[in-house]
Every structure is written in C-alpha cells, then in structure tokens.
Image: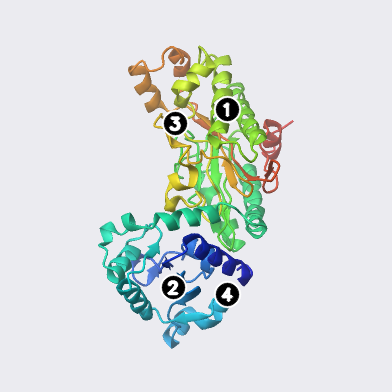
Amino acid sequence: MFDPKIYAQRRKLLRHQLQSGLILFLGHDDSPMNYAANTYEFRQDSSFLYFFGLDSPGLAGVVDVDENKDALYGNDIDLEDIIWMGFLPKLKERAAKVGVKETAPLDKLAEKLKQAKEQGRCIHYLPLYRAETSAKIEQWLGIPAQEAKAHASEELIKAVVSQRSIKIKEEIAEINRAFVITYEMYLTAMKMTKPGLYEREIVGRMEGMMIAQNCFPAFPTILTINGQILHSHYHGNLLKKGRLLIIDAGAESPLHYASDITRTIPVSGRFTPEQKEIYELVLASQMKAIQLIKPGIPYRDVHLEVARVIASGLKDLGLMRGDVEEAVGVGAHALFFPHGLGHMLGLDVHDMEGLGENYVGYTDKIRRSDQFGLAYLRLARELEPGFVVTVEPGIYFIPALIDQWQKEKKFKNFINYEKVEQYKNFGGVRIEDDVLVTAKGHRVLGQSIPKTIKDVESVTGKGK
C-alpha cells in the first residue's frame, strides 16, 4: 500500500468535491468459479483500492461528507478462517494503514445507510458491474438490483474520474514496476516464437513469469497468429512459417497498476517484404502519435493524424487511393484501422471504464463520433499532465469486413478492393506502448521492448 496520507488526502479531496452526502464504496467479495468454496483469484474493486487501499474481500468504505470522517466496515476473521486461510490482522489495524480511524462490523453498515436515508441525505455510489454488489444496494437502499446501476451518482463519477485520471509519482512507480516483468515476458516470448509451437506454450510461459514475480495479468492475454481478430483469447493455433504473431499483454503490479504492451513478431524470425511494408507503416504511425503527445492536445486529433499517416502509406502501397484528407474524413481508412488509438491506463487496463467510457474519455465539448472506427476511440479529450495513455495503432485485413464493404461498394473511390483481395490472408499488425503525459511533453514508460524491424529480428536470433 501507499503511505496512509495518500489515501486520506484522496478522501479529503473527494469530500471537498461533493460537499454533501454520504459516499459508499463497496469492495468485492470472493467470486465462486463453480461452487462456493472454489473461488477465482481475488481482485479488489479499483476505486475501493484507490480510496481505501485494502486488498481483501468483504469490505465497504464510507466517506461521510457532512460529518467530515471516513469509516471502514467489515468483519474480523474467526478461528475457522485462520485454519483454512491463515491469519489476518484486525480490521482496525488494517484501517490504520490507510488512514482510517473508525471501523465497524459489516452489519452496522445497513444501520448507517438506513439512518442516512431517514435523514434525507444523498447516498452516492459508483456504477455497479457485479450482481452481488447490485444485490447489496437493493438490500440496503431499496433500489431494485436491475435498476441499481442507473442510480449511480454522476456527481461522484465525475469527481472520481478527475482524481484517478492524474497519476502521482507513486502510481507511476507502480506502473513501471509492472513493466519490469512485462519487459522480461516479451523478450522471452520473442525468443520462443518459432514454427511448430502452439500459441498456448508462449502464453503459459509469459503468465507463469508474472505469477513468479507476485504479479498477475492485467487482462486476459491476447496472443494469436490471427491478428485480424482484435481481441482473440484463443490460444490453440500452431505457429507456422510465414505468419505474424500478435502479442497484446501486460502484468499488473502487486498494487494492481497495469501495463499494456503489444508487439507483432514474425513466426519465421524475419519479416517478408509484404509484412515489412505494413509493419513499417504501423511503426511510423505510432512514432508520429508519440511525438505529438503533450498537454492540451485532444487525443482525437492524435488519432486522426495517425489515420492520415496510415491512409497515406496504404495509398503508396496501392491499397487506398484518392485524396487522403477526404478518405479519413469519411472513415474509409477504418477498413484497415477500425479501432481507437488508445485509452487511459492505471488501476484498470482500460482505466475507469467501469465508471463510463464517455466520462473518462470525452467532455461536454468533445463528444463521441458515430462514424465507424472513430466511434471506438475510448479517449478523445485533451491530454493533461499526469495522464497515462496507450498508443496502439494497427493495420488489419479482416476478410468478413472486406467482403461486406466490397459487396456494398463502400468507399470504392478510396479503396482498391482488387489489391486488397491479395492481402485477405495477411492477418494484422499492432504496436503499442504506454506513455505518460508530462508538464512539457511526454515520456514512454518502461524499458524499451524491441519494436524496430532490426531489433525484433535480432531478438528472434534470425537477424543479420
């Protein structure tokens, strides 16, 4: 955990931002896999971690704005818990480590909430995404579980987003801590990649390395020779000569701060001329995006500049045609680049997505587009010092999408479908790094993982 003063300061700022009411943070319970005693690896709710820091199940936190105090609710363990799961300090001792003086058994929380309701006080809580949490809201506040998410406090959402968006030095240190193992994972994966292996063999090695360093995956690992599938979690394919392998993975630090990196690796150890052309174009677009990152620039502008680089390069290769500005303006490039450039990173790999993507990535002035491709941009707002963002452009050849657009003769003035047909078995290329927005510009986080063609081929042992 961080210093208790950090958590106390976060809650103090929250009280100042909301000015009145009672703020309820519900921690997670253990979640059964297939029966009650066989649970998934515990992962605490990220906003609970941010404000209350305790990484164990069965807890709830209350920030009482009107009374200017905080409290933690939970039950101390009994002998049976100790026998099966080991010793855990008293809640009061653990609460002191996050700057909370007042604690009470969990059943006392219902009384606290009932009293607040009777007094007509506003009870704020964040959007819910677990059924058991919605059930608690129904039990304690009388809001039907199916309606609980809709009653989340917009005022609280905006306050939490404003705090969690800006990463302090201790948080950056944790993200960099996650990068130490992520770097080693990628070097290992690059050295392992060769024809005849199954995808799962590399995934198993990478995730085993995380566990050995007291880390876990920040998200389910994406590792596939079918790079045209953006988020494929199937790992049963055999690696074959001539294919490209996309790896999108990242460790989560012991305090649950995420890393998120993507590299594209030639299974044979060397890129073919055709693969090299597409790869160099993606790399050029990514480097351009990183160069543009600074405070005040809307991330949507960076995304669109990347789209222009990609469209221009594809035009040079004969896959697109016509005026590049017009093509990007109507979204013709999204046949090849159908997703957004990146997202916030922090305690969640898509940081704060559970609070509502539009609250995190958009503002009253910068609203989400409904254009295919651009609509998937998770982060469009102006960048600020302290933001950590991913930069992950890609080029993909998705047969079903190509067939549909070609059948509809969509953007035929901008897309050379005859040439595109030759690439339908290509797969895809994506390159991703994580970048901190600084006061004057940016800083790429973590140790540099090979991404130039020369460096990638060198690590595979096939470079000259």
Front position among marks 2 and 4:
4
Considering the numbered disc 3 on the image, is that residue within a helix, a strand or a loop? loop
Give how far apart the Cα atoms at labels 2 and 1 are: 46 Å
Q: Nearer the viewer, residue 137 or 349?
A: 137
Q: Quadrant of the C terminus?
A: top right
Please identify the quarter of the rendering in which residue 192 is found: top right
The disc label shown at residue 305, or none = 1
Contact, CB < 8 Å: mark 2 with mark 1?
no
The residue that disc 2 covers is 59
Query: Could you say which quadrant of the image residue 119 lies in?
Result: bottom left
Asked whether the beta carbons under mark 1 and mark 3 sit within 8 Å of each other, the answer is: no
Give the label on residue 369, or none: none
User: Depth-wise, is mark 1 or mark 3 nearer the camera?
Assistant: 1
Give the spatial CA distance, label 1 vs label 4.
45 Å
* Amino acid type, residue under disc 4 in the picture: Gly
Mark 4 vs mark 3: give the one in front.
4
Q: Amino acid at mark 1?
A: Glu
Q: Is residue 118 visible to us here? A: yes
The local secondary structure at tag 4 comes to: loop
Labels 4 and 3 touching (C-beta < 8 A): no
Sequence-earlier tag: 1 or 3: 1
- As drawn, the label of residue 99 is 4
Q: Where does the image place residue 298, in percent across and percent down from the top left?
A: 56, 36
Which residue appears at 42% of the width and 33% of the height?
369
Q: How many marks?
A: 4
Judge by depth and name the residue closer to the eye, 95 or 268: 95
**For mark 2, does the 10 Å Cα neighbourhood hold few (<14), some (14 to 19), or many (20 or more) residues?**
many
Q: Report x, y in % for residue 220.
A: 48, 51
Q: Position of residue 186 (x, y in %)?
A: 62, 46
Q: Which residue is mark 3?
A: 373
